[in-house]
Amino acid sequence: MLSSVRREFDRVSAYPLTTYYLVLVSVLALTSLGLVMVLSASSITSYDGGEGSSFAYFNKQAGFVAVGIVLMVTATFFPLRWWEKLAWPAMGLGILMQALVFLPGLGKSTKGNANWIQFGGIQLQPSEFLKIALAVWLGCVLAKKAGKMTTFGHAMIPVVPGIAVAVGLIVAGNDLGTALILMVMALVCLFIGFFPWKYFLLLFGFLAAMTTFFVFSSQNRLQRITASLTGHADQTASDITGQAWQSNHGLFSLASGGWLGVGLGASREKWSWLPEAHNDFIFAIIGEELGLLGSLIVIVLFATLAYGLVRVIMRSKSRFVQIATAGLFAWMIGQGAVNIFVVTGMLPVIGVPLPFVSYGGSSIIACLLAIGVVLSFARTEDGAAAAIKAHKDRVRSSFAVLARKRK
C-alpha cells in the first residue's frame, strides 16, 4: 500500500501542471475563507460604524476580490519576456506612487501611517503594489548581473539604491511593519540571486541597524515590545487597557475557541472588544469561531501555497523566475507567518494583514495580482505548455460530444 501511495504521489508530483494547481487552489481556498471571515468579523463594526448594514465591509471586499481575480487571470497569460520588460517601468511607477503619499491633498494618513493616496472616493495603498514591483525588478536585475558582481560597484548598483529608495519612502511614512517585509523580500532575493556574501552581510547589518534605530527611537514601538513580553504572562505588570489590550484580547479570542470553535458568526470578541478584528487580527476570530481545527486549516493552506511557490523556484530554469518568485514567497508566506505570530503573542503587534484573508482592497488586489505573476511563471515549467494544450483539447472534445448528443 505504501509503495502504491508513493508511486501515485510521484506521478502527481511529476505532472507539469501540479505546481500551477497547488498555487491556484490554495489561493482560491484562502480567498474564499477570507470573504466568509470578513463578513463574520466585520458585521458588528460595519453596522455600528454608521454603514447601516452588516454587509458593507463584505460587499466592498467582494468587489476587491473580483477586481483581483480579473487581474490574476490576466497576468497568468503574460509571457515571461513581458515581465522582464515591465520590471523597470513597474519599479519606477511603484516608487512614484509611494512618493505621492507625501503630496498634500493626495496623500492620506491612517492611524499615524502616511501610506495612502486618495483619488476622489478611491483609496489606495501603494506599498502593496511596490512589493510586486520590487520582486520582479530584483529578479530582472540580479538575473542579468549573474556572474558579474565581482566588484563593489557592479554588486551595489543599481540594486542597493533601488532597495534603499523603496524602503526609505515607506519608513518615511512611519510604516515600519511594511518596511520590514520589503527588507526581508530584498534579502531573500539577494540570497537566491547569489549576491556576494561580503556585500550581503554588509547590507544585512545596515538594515538591521536601521531597524534597531527606528524601533528604539519610537516610544510607541518600545511599548509594544514591552507589552508582548509582560502583557500576557503577568496582568498586574501591564496596562491591560493600553498597549496590551489588542494582543491580550487576541489571545482571549483564540483561547475561547477550543478545538472546534464557538460557531461561525458567534464570536464575542468582535463586539468591539478586539480592535481590527476584520483586518490584522482576523486570525484570532478564525480561532474563536472555527477553533483549533479552523486555525490549522489556514496554516495548512499557507503551507500548501509555500510548497507550490518552492516548486516554482526549484523546477524553473530561469534565474529571473527563481529570484522573483523567492521575493514573492518572502512577502506572502513571511507576512502570513508574522501576522499569525503577532496574533498568538509570539511577536509584538505589527500592523500587517494576513494575505488573502484580512480585509483590505489594496492588499487583496496586490496579492492576487502577484499570484497571477507566479502562475504565469508556473506555465513555463517543462511540459506545462503541452499539458495545457492537451487539457484544452479534452475540454473541446467533451463539448463536441455533448453537442452531438443534444442533436
Image (cartoon, rainbow, N blue to C red):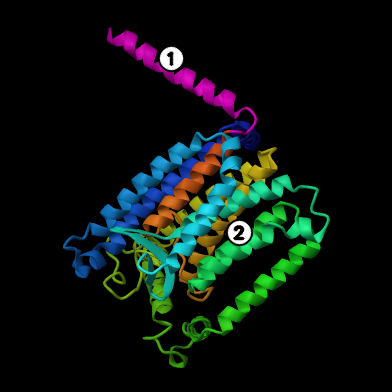
Secondary structure under the numbered disc 2 in the rendered image: helix
Whether 309 is among the magenta residues is no
Closest to the observer, 147 or 390 = 147
Q: Which residue is mark 2?
A: 185
Q: Which is more foreground, mark 1 or mark 2?
A: 2
| Residue at position x 53%, y 74% in the image | 347
Q: Which residue is mark 1?
A: 397
Q: Does 262 appear above or below 194?
A: below
**Label 2 crowd (10 A; few <14 / some 14-19 / many >=20):** many
Q: Quadrant of the N terminus?
A: top right
Q: Earlier in the sequence, mark 1 or mark 2?
A: 2
| Residue at position x 48%, y 39% in the image | 75
Q: Does 307 appear above or below 246?
A: above
**Which residue range is magenta in the image?**
380-407
Amino acid carrying mark 1 in the image: Ser
**Residue 49 sits in quarter:** bottom left
Q: Position of residue 93 (x, y in %)?
A: 51, 53
**Residue 281 sits in quarter:** bottom left
Q: Position of residue 134 (x, y in %)?
A: 58, 54
Amino acid carrying mark 2 in the image: Met
